[in-house]
Image (cartoon, rainbow, N blue to C red):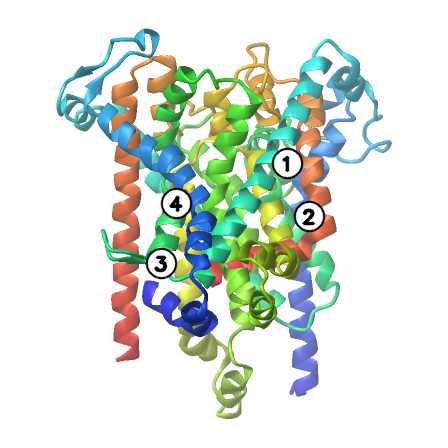
């Protein structure tokens, strides 16, 4: 049978859609699984896999009640709010400082005669700090934090995360500023505005999409971090991933239903961010990786 | 890569503006860059050097005051003959190669699929993006649930399809592949999105010409798409590999390094030695060996690909 061009194209598109749907199911199934497990009775978990609420198991709110009002609830609230405070403040600071550096690297010409470094060398030096394995710097960090009494404090963690996020923020924002037209700030400068004023009132508003994307990335990195929190906190400033990992490795064995609800507390905000600002995230990723 | 970057940047840097900017900008140029430089010098470069110093010391975490002693290369000689370290190095390299390779193949496939006139584009984009946004500690825990032998859905589905009961996490040979699968699930999105953007930036005329000339789809893919996508491919593979070398959080939660030490990574070993055993000097030596591994890998990877790219151009 001879297929027309249109028919082959149609078949190809159908196969494409089938494959895409299969991958979408693979992407979403684990999230669905945590969600339903958080509504299961212990019995429904131990009887083997159950897939559909009301059909093969009776959902219950017990795990959620225990999580939000049980004996561990105080730690849950504290670690959740710690995660939020640390992520928001360190992301905001990293974006502010990173925006200044990113702007400077595209508008001023630097030359450091010591190593004959120019703008691109400086930018590469900054991003290379993000590439090295965190474990190399984390032990000295811990010792420095002990000496300066910053262990398990919010201030210390905000500092640590700001430094962790800064190279990435500079790298991404440098690209955004490089793509902005200079005419507006040039005329403001000619009219006598100071460089800082031109930066604040003209450049920053123009770069808003880039600032938002960068902020979101730093937010997600910090919210998701485990290594820094594990090394530098133990209770007062402990974050949600630490709490999850701690509960997950208890000697009495994992309480799947309770841990599922707990994991959702950490996952849900990230899903929400993805749904709301997918465009910014995609753009930030592409700029950060390709440019 | 550096050269490509600098050429790309030239037109956007307003050189004439810089030359015309008044003297007051000398102060501004310093003020804008200083905070970043100071933070990085103080909290990234200094710890890095401090860590290097520690690698030549014997220092116990429980006696931070006055316990530091110079022992030369002893930490490194111990390291070379430490079978547990070599095991972690092997696990880490196997993980990097396995997960990044799998992610690239799947990511490229999905990017090619998405780079067509498909429906529900937004739904797919969001669904495909979600895994990489999730907290690794929670993902590790989810993996532990999914791969559970008797209560997990993966084995259940395999058995429904007539397959055997697979001891994913309790078999020391399968634990690492399970981790690779989970990491792949989380990070294919990154590859997909960036490679898709790379595909969309290729000139469409080129493909039309090839099609008009009667080239098969496979030939177009092999001779046009892949070579033109090479710079983006190198970048995403490098970024993912650098991250994969640091593997820590999902292993800690999913297998805890077990069974035995079958999934213990270099980062985990450095953590255990430094925090649990309190041997800061030896832990620093382990951490530095990871840094050396990363540098060697990036150099070899970039050089071999650059050589091949030059051969293709010639």
Q: Is residue A146 above or below residue B112?
A: above
Q: CA distance from mark 2 to mark 1?
A: 16 Å
Can you say which quadrant of the picture contains the C terminus of chain B?
A: bottom left
Say whether residue B198 is left or right of residue B283: right
Residue matched to label 2: A274
In front of the other: label 3 or label 2?
Answer: 3
- Mark 1 or mark 4, which is nearer the start of the sequence? 1
The first of marks 2 and 1 along the sequence is 1
**Rendered location of residue A54, percent (x, y):** 86, 31
Q: Residue at x 28, y 65 (%)?
A: B306
Q: Which residue is mark 3?
A: A110
- A226 to the left or right of B79: right
Q: Secondary structure at mark 3?
A: loop
Label whose residue precedes the other's in the sequence (4 or 2): 4
Tell which circle, 3 or 2, labels the residue nearer the N-terminal end: 3
Q: CA distance from mark 3 to mark 4?
A: 23 Å
Crowdedness of circle 4 by 10 Å Cα count: few (<14), some, many (20+)?
some
Q: Residues within 10 Å of mark 2 (few under 14, many from 20)?
A: many
- For the residues labelled 4 and 2, the Cα–Cα distance comes to 25 Å
C-alpha gap between disc 3 and disc 2? 38 Å
| Residue at which label 4 appears | A131
The reply to whether label 2 and label 1 mark residues of one chain is yes
Categorize mark 3 by other alpha carbons within 10 Å: few (<14), some (14-19), many (20+): some
Residue depth check, mark 4 versus mark 2: number of the one nearer the observer: 4
Q: Chain of mark 2?
A: A
Above or below, B76 against A113 in this view is above
């Amino acid at each position: 049978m001879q297929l027309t061009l249109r028919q082959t194209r149609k078949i190809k598109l159908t196969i494409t859609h089938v494959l895409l749907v299969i991958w979408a199911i693979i992407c979403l199934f684990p999230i669905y699984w945590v969600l339903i497990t958080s509504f299961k009775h212990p019995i429904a978990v131990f009887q083997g896999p159950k897939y559909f609420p009301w059909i093969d198991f009776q959902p219950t709110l017990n795990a959620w009640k225990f999580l939000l009002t049980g004996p561990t609830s105080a730690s849950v609230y504290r670690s959740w709010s710690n995660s939020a405070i640390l992520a928001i403040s360190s992301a905001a600071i990293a974006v502010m400082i990173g925006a200044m550096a990113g702007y400077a690297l595209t508008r001023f010409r630097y030359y450091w005669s010591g190593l004959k470094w120019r703008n691109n060398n400086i930018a590469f030096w900054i991003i290379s700090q993000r590439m090295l394995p965190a474990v190399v710097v984390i032990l000295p960090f811990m010792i420095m934090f002990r000496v300066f009494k910053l262990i398990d404090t919010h201030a210390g963690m905000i500092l640590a995360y700001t430094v962790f996020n800064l190279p990435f923020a500079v790298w991404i924002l440098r690209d955004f500023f490089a793509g902005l037209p200079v005419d507006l700030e040039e005329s403001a400068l000619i009219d006598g505005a100071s460089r800082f004023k031109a930066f604040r009132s003209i450049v920053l508003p123009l770069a808003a999409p880039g600032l938002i994307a960068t902020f979101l990335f730093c937010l997600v990195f910090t919210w998701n971090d485990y290594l820094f929190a594990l090394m530098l906190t133990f209770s007062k400033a402990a974050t949600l991933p630490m709490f999850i990992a701690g509960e997950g490795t208890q000697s009495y064995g994992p309480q799947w239903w309770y841990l599922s609800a707990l994991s959702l507390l950490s996952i849900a905000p990230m899903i929400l961010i993805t749904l709301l600002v997918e465009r910014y995230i995609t753009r930030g990723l592409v700029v950060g990786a390709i440019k | 890569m550096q050269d490509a970057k600098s050429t790309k940047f030239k037109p956007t840097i307003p050189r004439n503006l810089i030359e015309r900017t008044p003297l007051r900008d000398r102060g501004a140029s310093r003020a804008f860059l200083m905070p970043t430089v100071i933070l990085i010098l103080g909290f990234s470069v200094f710890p890095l050097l401090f860590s290097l110093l520690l690698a030549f010391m014997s220092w116990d975490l429980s006696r931070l005051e006055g316990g530091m002693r110079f022992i030369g290369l002893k930490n490194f000689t111990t390291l070379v003959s430490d079978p547990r370290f070599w095991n972690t190095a092997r696990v880490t390299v196997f993980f990097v190669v396995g997960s990044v390779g799998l992610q690239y193949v799947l990511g490229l496939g999905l990017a090619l699929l998405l780079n067509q006139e498909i429906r529900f584009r937004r739904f797919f984009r969001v669904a495909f993006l979600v895994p990489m946004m999730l907290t690794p500690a929670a993902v590790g825990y989810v993996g532990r649930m999914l791969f559970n032998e008797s209560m997990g859905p993966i084995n259940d589905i395999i058995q429904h399809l007539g397959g055997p009961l697979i001891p994913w996490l309790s078999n020391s040979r399968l634990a690492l592949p399970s981790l690779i699968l989970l990491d792949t699930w989380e990070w294919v999105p990154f590859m997909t999105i960036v490679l898709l953007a790379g595909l969309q930036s290729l000139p469409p005329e080129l493909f039309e010409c090839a099609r008009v000339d009667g080239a098969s789809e496979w030939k177009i893919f092999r001779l046009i798409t892949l070579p033109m996508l090479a710079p983006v491919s190198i970048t995403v593979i490098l970024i993912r590999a650098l991250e994969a070398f640091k593997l820590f959080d999902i292993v800690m939660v999913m297998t805890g390094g077990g069974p035995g030490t079958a999934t213990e990574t270099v980062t985990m070993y450095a953590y255990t030695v430094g925090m649990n055993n309190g041997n800061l000097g030896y832990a620093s030596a382990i951490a530095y060996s990871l840094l050396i591994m990363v540098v060697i890998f990036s150099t070899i990877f970039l050089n071999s690909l650059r050589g091949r790219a030059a051969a293709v151009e010639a």
